[in-house]
Every structure is written in structure tokens, then in C-alpha cells.
Image (tube, coloured by chain):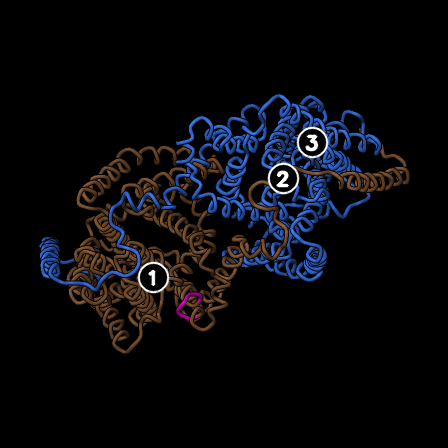
Chain colours: A blue, B brown
Amino acid sequence: MFAPRNKAAVMAAYLAMLAAAGGAFWLVVRQGEGLVAPPPEGAPFAAGSAATHGADPLVHFLLALAVIIAVARALGALFARIGQPPVIGEVVAGILLGPSVLGHLAPGVAAFLLPAAITPHLGLVSQVGIVLFLFLVGVELDTSMLRDKSGPATAVAHASVVAPFALGSTFALYAYPRLSSSDVPFHVFALFLGVSLSVTAFPVLARILRDQRLDHTPLGVTALTCAAIDDVTAWCLLAFVVGIARADVGGAVRTVAGTAVFLVAMVLLAGPVVRRWVARYGPARPPGQAALATALVALLASALATEVIGIHALFGAFILGALVPHGSEVAAYLHRKLDDMVVVLLLPAFFALSGLRTEIGLLGGASDWLLVAFVVLLATAGKLGGTALAARLSGFGWRDATALGALLNTRGLMQLIVLNVGLELRAISPKLFAVLVVMALVTTLMTAPLLRALTSTASRVAPGARASRPT
Amino acid sequence: MFAPRNKAAVMAAYLAMLAAAGGAFWLVVRQGEGLVAPPPEGAPFAAGSAATHGADPLVHFLLALAVIIAVARALGALFARIGQPPVIGEVVAGILLGPSVLGHLAPGVAAFLLPAAITPHLGLVSQVGIVLFLFLVGVELDTSMLRDKSGPATAVAHASVVAPFALGSTFALYAYPRLSSSDVPFHVFALFLGVSLSVTAFPVLARILRDQRLDHTPLGVTALTCAAIDDVTAWCLLAFVVGIARADVGGAVRTVAGTAVFLVAMVLLAGPVVRRWVARYGPARPPGQAALATALVALLASALATEVIGIHALFGAFILGALVPHGSEVAAYLHRKLDDMVVVLLLPAFFALSGLRTEIGLLGGASDWLLVAFVVLLATAGKLGGTALAARLSGFGWRDATALGALLNTRGLMQLIVLNVGLELRAISPKLFAVLVVMALVTTLMTAPLLRALTSTASRVAPGARASRPT
């Protein structure tokens, strides 16, 4: 079928062809230069690279993403080295790139790296990132933990929400006349402060437990169960707050009714469909691009539904994720395909956006920093204290009860999500936002050292050696 | 460590706690309702869900992505069923959602599904998608194919670029007074038409060969080698065209010099660094999130460099990808992590954007469709004819030479990328864009049936049975 010819002849023909083509193109251009084209319509032809590039959002978007990822990874690695969860470094990276540090020290550099023109794009990308992230949190949520109500976990978990919520909403009596705005109703503000003190960062908690090899101890399993219940409770509360904050009187009823219908429809109708669909895949028939496309369309539709109802898109994503059976082939596939991209590319964009919104400069005098210290104390008293007390009453020893409280006091990323929702709704002022971001960082930073101090190495088990759950 | 207490006592304490918390919150709200907050600053508090949602870009972005993915997958599956590469279905999906079909039949629906306000976001996401996609094309490119110049592949490949390029630029003599604009210089227009007739879609070609089990035959291997050389040649030509199209006289020199410096720096400086970095990973030390972050930052920096130089971001991405050793652990990891997301989520967004820009309605009378037919003929004569002739002269039989020509005539996705670059530069008019999109679709549609007609099943080998390359 293939018979090589004389190589020299082929080469000669080839060179002749190139020469002929070059000559022909030269003739065409000489010929064509006399031609006149129709007059231009609309925007002018894009000549002059400088003019074009000044307005090119792609350049700034690529630059911003590169800087954000690089700084986030560098600081994440730094914090991991000093025994802290890397996520703190990534949040700090966002604050460093924002107006608090870079914008303060070198406004020109900050405006070049993260100009205001790309903020809407960054906002949309990070919102999609949070939607994907909460979908994955839902996928990894072991819902059987929630169903098993025989243990003390439910009581402890609810105490760990109720105590900080009560303290936070009481604090609203002090904060409302000072840190709110007269067009925000008091009940919305109080609910919001309550929720933002009662959040626990399930993913950060899981990582701290894994890092310290506590994830299969009774303490670790109880902490994870409590955090899962906490998460669901806090998200429900937040959805409720967002619903009534966004709506007028008629709208509030519509939002609550819509949410109820949505939840029932998801559990009763979508649940069986999801489980049947997931069961189609297995080791013999691994999920592929078609499965990913189906999952993404369902995820987008579910997120869209909750956003239209009036609660946030992330609830729809989280609930759909929770319907995917934990440990299934599809759950593993989705995690494998999405997790690294979300963690490496999209979450840092969210942290950067949070950082851009955080103005530490708003915390001016000693009185403001006293306020920060007070909020940290309040949050810790509510979460750590409430949890420890409830755990002690349920039969844990003081040391483990306190360790459990320290664990659930981790607010990390989840708190930032709640705060951004609150800021977008204008339920909290930029100054209160800054106070609560610092509180989230401090309570998350406290967790690992406190935990190391409270747990002896004897109470840890090697990875793989599963302890039975404390029921 | 954990001693269960009386269950009833725990439950009673728990209920008391809930009741106390509820009562406390009620008291707080009653107390707080008399408080007055400071006057609002800036935008009003976001009450009234209808008002908020009308302006919410997230809703429209989620909706648009869901619709785009669903329609693209559905049409892709449809085209796969009739023996065509799915990518054609995805491109057609984009055209269906654009002004040509949906915008024409139901303008209200089109404006709701893909409103003009989200086009900038969609544009940015699809540009990032194309950058990632061309990075992956580079990663999968076996550069050893390009180095092996002993075979006839180089001569055939260059003929398959030169012939359509010559025909396309000659055609510019006819098209410039009719389909261009007087502020586009003739030489830019002629170069652009030449390039857009000489593109080959390497990824589509690879998929067609795999589908028809031809990828390990001498024909398939020659086709892939030619397409790889074609791609590199066409991208270099396009970079050159973009460089001189964007620049004034001084700018053109700067762009050409910048491109040369960039290429030398990438091959001589970045190449060894990339190879050393890739060699750090292996089966014993698989790449993870840190490797993904490093790769993404390098990719963004490289794309940024070419965009700033004045050629398109996608060249930087492609060249960096080509530096990653084909078949390495890192190449496999990057493909695994990025490919599905890019193919399922980001490329459909690009197709939709191309569809939004394609106005088939601009092709009005019979004379316009005659023009389309003529351009298809010209493109096929140049690519299929030129390739077949060169392959015959190099020693292939007529049947295989024609099959090779038919394969390289596949323009698919790559042609759309070139056309979008041309439209953004305003080097081609919307009408010529529509003509060339139809040409790209028709030449891609022709490939699979032509190939089936030309190759007997005898010349195919079972997957896994590798034929030696025709050298």
C-alpha cells in the first residue's frame, strides 16, 4: 500500500511547492492591494495592541487567577508546616491580596492584580465554585450518621448550635444600634448574628481530625456526626434567614412554602431517581463523561431552583449532593473529577473575593479590637462551652467533652460562606463583616493547638483501625 | 471515657434547652424591636425577591450552563448514533441556541435562556475553557512525531497546509471587495482566509480514527502525524496573522520579536525545567493537588505571556502543554483531572458562544448559499486534493492517499477557534463568519462517510495490534 519513492525527488518537489506557494501569495497580495472593501460597520477593526489590551478582561482574569492560586498555595503550605489547616493560609492569602494589606501598602499593584473590572467575573466563578464545593460536601456527607439518633450525638449537636445561637442573637441587642443599618429589620440582624456564631466547618474539621489521626476514635466520630448535624441545622437556619431577609411579607410565606415543597420533592421524588441512577454504575460499568454531564445538569437545576425560591443556590447543590449515596461508585467518581479542580482553582477565587471584601482597616481603634476579642470570646463560649457542657451531661469525661467543644468551634470556610451571603444581602455591615472574618480565623486557628493539648497520643488510633461508634 | 447517662434525663434536659433557647430568642426580638440602627449607606438592603432576582447574574449563568450542557450532550449523542463525531452535535447545539434558530423562532425564550448580560461571563469562561483545552491538546501531542522527519509525513503535511492556504488567499481577491471592511488591510484578510481553509482538527480526527479502529494502521498514524504538523503550522501562521493584525508597524516588529523570544525561552529554558519537574513524579509518588496548582499557575502565566506579546493566550497554553512529556505520569494525571470537566462543561460553553455569534440568517438568497457551496468546494479541493496529490507523489496508493486527504479535511472545533479569533479581531465579517462556520461543519460531516467508503474493513486492525509506522 505504501511504496517509498526517491527521497531526493520528493524533497525537490516539496521545495518547489513551498517556493511556488510563497510566490503565489506574493502575487495575490500585490494584486489585492488595489481592492477597496465596503465601509466598516460597528466597532473599529482592532488595531493597536496597547489599546486592545487595556480593555482585555482575559489578561486580567488570567493574571488574577495565577496570582490567587500561587499565593493561596504558598500560604496554605506555610500554615500546614506550622500545624494549622492549610485552608487558614488560603483565607489569609485572600486578605493579604485585598484592601486590608496589599491595597493599603501598594494600591497601584493591587489595582493592577485585581482590578475592580474583574470582580463580577471573579464573583461568578467563586459562586459556581462554592456551589460545586457544597455539592461535594453533600456527596461526602454520610447521611446514615444523621439517621442514627440513638446516641448522644443529636443532643450534643443541637446544644452546640443552640448555645452560640442564643449568645449571638442576644449580642444583637448591643450590636444593632452600632453596627447595623436602619433598613435592616432587627429580627433579620439577630437571626443572622446567631447563625454566624453557630456554624461549624465540617470539611476543615474532617481535615484536622485526619491530620491528628483522630478520625476513627469515638471522639472523632462523635465530632464528625455533630458537625454533620450542625451543618444541616445551620444551613436550614441560614436558608430561613435568607428567605425572610430577601422577602417582603407575602414573599416570606412564598419562600417558606417553596422551600418546604422543594425539600419534600427532593427527598421523595428526586431521591429514588438519584439512587436508581447511581445504582446503574459500578466497577463493571464505571461512570464517565455522560454521567458527569447528567450530574452537572441536575446540580445546576437544583441550585437554580433554590436560588429562584429565594434561598441561596448553595442549598440546592448541598441537598442534591446529600441524595447521592455515600460510598457509591458515582460519589467516588464525582469526588475524583471535581474535588481537585474545586479546591485548587475555585475555592482560592472565593477566598480572594472574601479577602477583597474584608477591610481590616475599618477596625480602627482599641475599642474595635476589644469588640473583636469580645466576639471571639462569645463565639467560643457559645460553641466550645455549650458543646462541652452538653457532652459532659451526656456522659463524656471533661477532657473529651472540652476537646469535642474545641473541634466544633472550628468555623473556617463555612463561616466565610455565611458571611458573604450576609454581606451580599447587606444584613451585616462591612465593619461587622471584618469583625466576623477575624473571629472565624481566630476560632479556626485555636482548634489544632487546643486539640493537641487536650488529647493524649494514647487516645488516638492508627489510621485504618476503626473504633466502634459510642452508642 | 464515655459512660451513657439515663436516656430520659438527657432527653428532658435537651427539650428544656430547646424551649429555653426559643423563649430567649423571643425575648431578644421583643427587646430589640425598639432599637434604632444607624442610617443606611450605599445600596439599599436587598428586600423584595423579584427585584433582586431580575438582576441576579448567578441565576442566568446557572440556567444558561444547564441548558447548554443538556442540549450539547443530547445532540452529541444523536450525532454519535448516526456515525458522526459528537463534537458536530455540540456545535450544532450552539447554533440552535443562538440567533439562527432559537433567536429567530422564539426571541423571548432565547433572550431568557441566554440574555446579553451573561455573554461577557460566558465569553470569559469559554476562553478559559479553550486555553485549558489547547493545553491538553499540547499535553497529548506526541512531539516525537514531529521530530521524526525521515518519513513522507512532513512533505504531505506541508502540502496539506500550503494548497488550501494558497486557494484561500487567492479567494480573498474575490471576497475582499464583497465581504470585508475597508479598515481591514488586504494582507490581513488574505492571510486569515488562507489560515482558515488550512486548519485540521487534530482532536476530532483522533476520535474519528479511534471510532473506526484505524488509529494504529499506517494510514491512521500518517494522518495523526500530518495533523499534528498541520496544527503546529496552522497555529504558527495564525499567531503571525493575529500579531500583524493587532499591531501597528512598530507593534508588528515587537510582536514577531516577542514571539521569537518567547518560543526560544520556552524550548530552551522552560523545557528542561518542565521535564525535571515531571520526572519528580511517578507511580511511587503520584501527582496531587500541589502538582495541579503548579501546572495551573504555569499554564496561566504562559497563556498570559502570549496574550501580552500580542498573539492569543491559547498559543502559550498549547506550547506549555507540548513541553510536558507525552505518556508521563503528570500528563496522565492532568488529562484525568481536566479533560472531563473541559469537555463536558467548558467546551459546550464555547460552542454556545460560537453559536450565539453565528447568524445563519445573514445568508439570505441563493447567491449566498452558492458562495457557501463554493467555499466548501475550495476548502475541500485545497485540503483533500492537495493532501491526496502529495500523498500519491510520496508513494501512497490512490485510495489511501484520498482517505488521508479526507481525514485532514476535518476542520471541526479547531476551525471554530480560528474563526472566533478572526471575528474578535474583526478580520472577518459576521456574514463571512457564518459562511466559514457552515464550511467547517460540512467538511467535518463529510469525513466519516468518505472514510468508510474509501477504507475496506481489511485495512483496519483490531485495537491493540500496533502496525509499524510507514517510514
Disc 2 vs disc 1: Cβ atoms closer than 8 Å? no
Structural distance between the alpha carbons of marks 3 and 1: 54 Å
- What's the residue type where badge 2 is placed? Pro
Tell me: B388 left or right of B349: left
Secondary structure type for disc 1:
helix
Local packing at callout 3 (Cα closer than 10 Å; few below 14, some 14-19, many 20+) is: many
Disc nearest the viewer among 2 and 3: 2
Q: Which residue is identified by label 3?
A: A407
Asked if marks 2 and 1 fall on the same chain, the answer is: yes
Where are the magenta residues, as a range? B97-101
Q: Where is residue B188 in the image (x, y as percent from the top left)?
A: 20, 55
Q: Mark 1 lies on which chain?
A: B
Secondary structure type for disc 2:
loop
How many numbered badges does the structure rendering display? Answer: 3
Q: Mark 3 lies on which chain?
A: A
Q: Which residue is identified by label 2?
A: B39
Local packing at callout 2 (Cα closer than 10 Å; few below 14, some 14-19, many 20+) is: few
Disc 3 vs disc 1: Cβ atoms closer than 8 Å? no
Kindly identify which numbered label has been placed on residue B412.
1
- What's the residue type where badge 1 is placed? Gly
Disc nearest the viewer among 2 and 1: 2
Structural distance between the alpha carbons of marks 2 and 1: 59 Å
Disc 2 vs disc 3: Cβ atoms closer than 8 Å? no
> Quadrant location of residue A3?
bottom left
Q: Where is residue B115 in the image (x, y as percent from the top left)?
A: 47, 60
- What's the residue type where badge 3 is placed? Leu
Asked if marks 2 and 3 fall on the same chain, the answer is: no
Residue A385 vertical placement versus B53 (above, below): above
